[in-house]
Amino acid sequence: MEVAVLPVSEIESLVLLPAVASAIASSEGFAGQALDVRLGALRDELVALASTGVEAAVMQYCRRRIDRTLKKVDLSAAKTSDHLAEEYLERTQAVDVRKLAEEARSTLEIALRAKNLPAMLRYFDGKGAFMAAAAKHLKSTRREHFEEWLLRVLRSGSVPGLVDAFRQSLPAIPAPK
């Protein structure tokens, strides 16, 4: 079974990717410079929001990596408690948390300085605040109304290009062999 990784930290953040956000704003009649201004304002607000949460994003990233590593630890071959302790220590010491944090922090700071939303959204999961910003800048509405609208139009396919923008933003999953 193939598993694909989302290009964002949380699935809700897909609406913030440039292609999807552009399709949403275009459906509201924005085009040309007005569209660019609208998307730029969204990007700037997301960068400002994210800039205040770098350490929290780094911590979340590290926790997820540690959790993923621990889930892969197989200690079933250990026959004694000493062997179990050795195996556990060996497997967990392989995770260099300081290095993970340093790499994540550096990547985030570069993404924020460049205002690179796709790179930034791989780490941040500010669902509530990020979705509120999307609602404000893309639909001029509140988050709850935006989320309801989004579900309706995705089900009905009534916004031209929106489903395609989502598809283009998602990783390709190869057909079963």
Image (cartoon, helix red, strand yellow):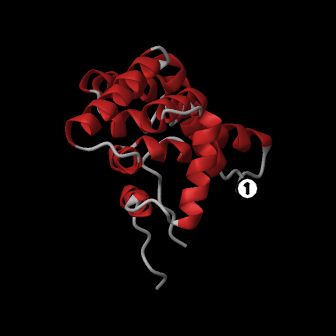
Query: With 82 as the anchor, is 13 left or right in this view?
Result: left
* Residue 90 appears in the rendering: no
Residue 18 located left or right of residue 76: left
* Label 1 CA crowd tier, 10 Å (few <14, some 14–19, many 20+): few
Q: Residue at x 60, y 34 (%)?
A: 143
Residue that numbered label 1 is attached to: 76
Q: Residue at x 45, y 22 (%)?
A: 50
Q: Residue furthest bottom?
A: 177
Point 50% across, 37% down: residue: 94
Q: Is residue 31 above or below residue 127?
A: below
Residue at x 46%, y 47% (from the top left corner): 14
Label total for image: 1
Residue farthest to the left, as pictured: 33
Q: Is residue 62 above or below residue 122?
A: above
Nearer the observer, 97 or 153: 153
- The type of residue carrying mark 1 is Ser
Residue 171 appears in the picture as rendered: yes
Q: Residue furthest top?
A: 52
Q: Position of residue 57 (x, y in %)?
A: 51, 25
Residue 145 location, x and y as percent? 62, 40
Residue 47 picture location, percent across and down: 38, 23
Q: Secondary structure at mark 1?
A: loop
Q: Which residue occupies the foreground of this view, 60 or 6?
A: 6
> Could you tell me which quadrant the N terminus lies in?
bottom right
Question: In the image, residue 156 lies at what x, y percent?
Answer: 56, 66
Instruction: Identify which residue, 157 or 107, lies in the foreground.
Output: 157
